[in-house]
Image (cartoon, rainbow, N blue to C red):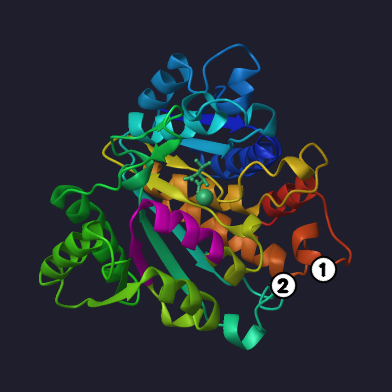
Amino acid sequence: MPHSIVLLPGDGIGPEVIAAARLVLDTVARRAGREIVIESCPIGGAALRQGLPPLPPATLAACQRADGVLLGAVGDPAFDHLPSSERPEGGLLGLRKGLGLYANLRPARIWPGCEGAGPLKPEVARGSDLLIVRELTGGLYFSEPRGIDRDRGVAFNTMRYSVGEIERIARVAFDAARRRRRLVTSVDKANVLETSQLWRAVVTRLASDYPEVTLQHMYVDACAMALVTSPSRFDVVLTENLFGDILSDEAAVIAGSIGLLPSASIGDGPGLFEPVHGSAPDIAGRDIANPIGAIASAAMLLEHSLGAVEEARAIDAAINRVLTEGHRTADLAGGGPHVSCSRMAELVAAALA
Ligand code: IPM
Ligand code: MN
């Protein structure tokens, strides 16, 4: 049976980086003799522009049937005036909910030669290799009640977590730590929030099932600082939805560019894989985006959804080779010579040999 992959190019630079990832996917699959069937569907602003809702029912159905889903980005300033549920972002949130994707894995590490690419001093960034495990279907993003009462001039959201929700995401983090450097840093705001107090208690209790893993707790404000002052002290960072959203953008600074970061969203059905960078409307359509986050996301899809570990490793090795040879997209070039998005994809595909 061929594997089925759904591509959701979406908005802004999404279509460019997905075309790049597709080239690499097709190349690696062909070499491995692996048959994959690829289908593209609209989501986000791209769907709205076709007169469809941000998550068309046909798109959700295709994703539910697929082995894995690769998404570019959603977000389009043309729709910023709409209420939350009708904005492009609603498409992504609906997909997370619809596929039950409760665990978001966001690795941030230094690729070779990129130590000086970001604003951190190379000696601070060097050796950093962390994984943010972000809870993705609870917390402030999804809990009820929520709303705006325009007559009274108030708006409200709810942060709610159940023991079951905390346990299942904590297990993802502990399992990941077992395969890594065996340290989990659980991030919360337990000095203020009841949800965090429950979070801390549940994570602490669960830790006894993983005696080989060290657990530490950190407040989110302290973690935000430590991530950029001493990033190499972290292995697995476990946190709730909104904290994880914020900290994972911050962690991009460690890697040198947000364009390098892949992510995986995992539930009980098909997984969703996407670069962390978002739609970047300011550079869309110019073929200058960094496709490596999307290409590395395709590698995560191969590994997690298709069990194609060797092909995933081959893509990582190809990215490694191309960066080691000194090829850079504009975001990493510091004003120096750089290659286009599509050229970077060709280089990675060629390096698969
Ligand atoms: C992300 C994005 C999304 C989020 C938006 C687009 C809804 O920022 O994947 O981090 O906030 O989760
Ligand atoms: Mn985000």
Image coords of residue 207 (percent x, y) = 15, 70
- Magenta segment range? 236-250
- Report which residue position mark 1 lands on: 334
Residue situated furthest top in the rendering: 51
Residue 16 sits in which quadrant? top right
Question: Between residues 9 and 227, which one lies in front from this camera angle?
Answer: 227
* Secondary structure of residue under mark 1: loop
Image: 286 above or below 215: above
- Where does the N terminus fall, quadrant-wise? top left
Q: Are marks 2 and 1 in contact (CB under 8 Å)?
A: yes
Amino acid at the residue labelled 2? Ala
| Quadrant in which the C terminus appears | bottom right
- The foreground one among 218 and 192 is 192
Q: Residue at x 64, y 54 (%)?
A: 292
- Amino acid marked by disc 1: Gly
Q: Nearer the viewer, residue 163 or 350?
A: 163
Real-space CA distance between mark 2 and mark 1, rounded to the nearest whole angstrom: 7 Å
Is residue 134 visible from the viewing direction of this image?
yes
- For the stretch drawn in magenta, the main secondary structure is helix
x, y percentage for residue 119? Answer: 69, 75
Q: Residue at x 65, y 55 (%)?
A: 259
Q: Secondary structure at mark 2?
A: loop
Residue 194, image x, y percentages = 21, 59
Residue at label 2?
117
